[in-house]
Image: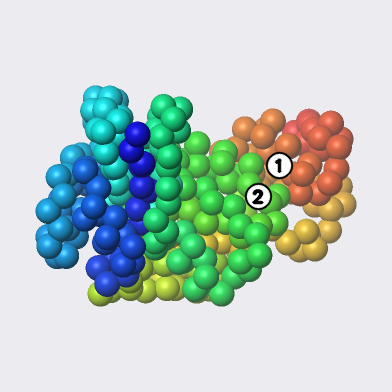
Amino acid sequence: MGTLYVVGTPIGNLEDITLRALRTLRQVSLTAAEDTRTTGRLLAHYQIETPLTSYWEHSKLSKLKTILATLEAGDVALVSEAGMPGLSDPGYELIRAAIEAGHQVSPIPGPTAPITALVVSGLSTDRFLYLGFLPRRGRARRRLLAKVAPVEHTLVAFEAPHRLLETLGDVESILGDREMAIARELTKLHEEVWRGQVSQARDHFSVQPPRGEFTLVIAGANPQERRWEEEGVRAAVEELMGAGVPRREAVKAVAQMADWPPQKVYQLALTKEES
């Protein structure tokens, strides 16, 4: 039985690929790629002629059986459009299917945008929470932000340029004016790592229209920032609800942040509404 190699590829600069990754891509029977155009350019650059097939969100179900059949006779390399496969891309399903079919799954480590952005952000790297791509719809995005508001770990997420300003507004209204870093086009020609407060980021990108691929790194919650007396708890619930977070979820998030019983926070919120 063949091995599925999970191969990290450059997130921008083609020189960031490892020697082991190049050797593996030459030796496997097939390379399954999230974007055959991007991977095709990489293979052509290094004069690799291994057969290539697409494996992306809208083809994963139809290609799964073919790739597993290939694994019965030989090795297969899985690559994403950029970075490590399996993170916010359809590679996860293939990895699980290969494991369930009894194949060995071997990682070939390489670049990954979340870790790259985190280590250059200047924020704490001891503990972090990766959120992947933030929800496209504002309501769903705000609900997610409310859930992670109490988390003291550094937050890492992807965002599209056309939603960046709207997302920064949600971040400021729900998480507060925290310290953050915004990494753009990492390892590419126009690489930029912006650092400052969320409000400053909104001002900056209002003047400089967002372009490229963005990774957001946001400081975790600071439990010492707010005195959690009754008025502070009420105000925090109001802020979240004012940003569009449902009352039940706002209460839960504030209870976690303040280390208060949820029922007591709920009663304070009702008291404020009735007054």
Q: Which residue is mark 2?
A: 149
Residue 161, image x, y percentages: 33, 56
What's the residue at 81%, 49% (across, down)?
258
Q: Earlier in the sequence, mark 2 or mark 1?
A: 2
Q: Quadrant of residue 104?
A: top left
Q: Quick check: 272 above or below 145? A: above
Determine the residue positioned at 37% across, 74% down: 192
Q: Quick one: label 1, few (<14), some, or many (20+) residues within 10 Å?
A: many
Quarter of the image where one finds residue 102: top left
Measured as percent of width and height from the top left, residue 254 is found at 74, 44
Q: Which mark is residue 253?
A: 1
**Residue nearest the observer in this picture, 231 or 106:** 106
- Mark 2 touching mark 1, by CB under 8 A? yes
Residue for point 33% across, 66% down:
18
Q: How many marks?
A: 2
Asked if residue 136 is positioned above or below residue 130 in the image, the reply reads: above
Is residue 86 shown left or right of residue 213?
Answer: right
Marks 2 and 1, how far apart in space?
Answer: 7 Å
Q: Secondary structure at mark 2?
A: loop
Above or below, 49 relative to 78: below
Image coords of residue 150 (percent x, y):
70, 50
Indicate left or right for 188 with 131 as reference: left
Query: Helix, strand or loop at disc 1?
Result: helix
Q: Is residue 248 left or right of residue 25?
A: right
Within 10 angstroms of label 2, few (less than 14), some, or many (20 or more) residues? many
Residue 91 seen in this snapshot: yes
Q: Is residue 199 visible?
A: no
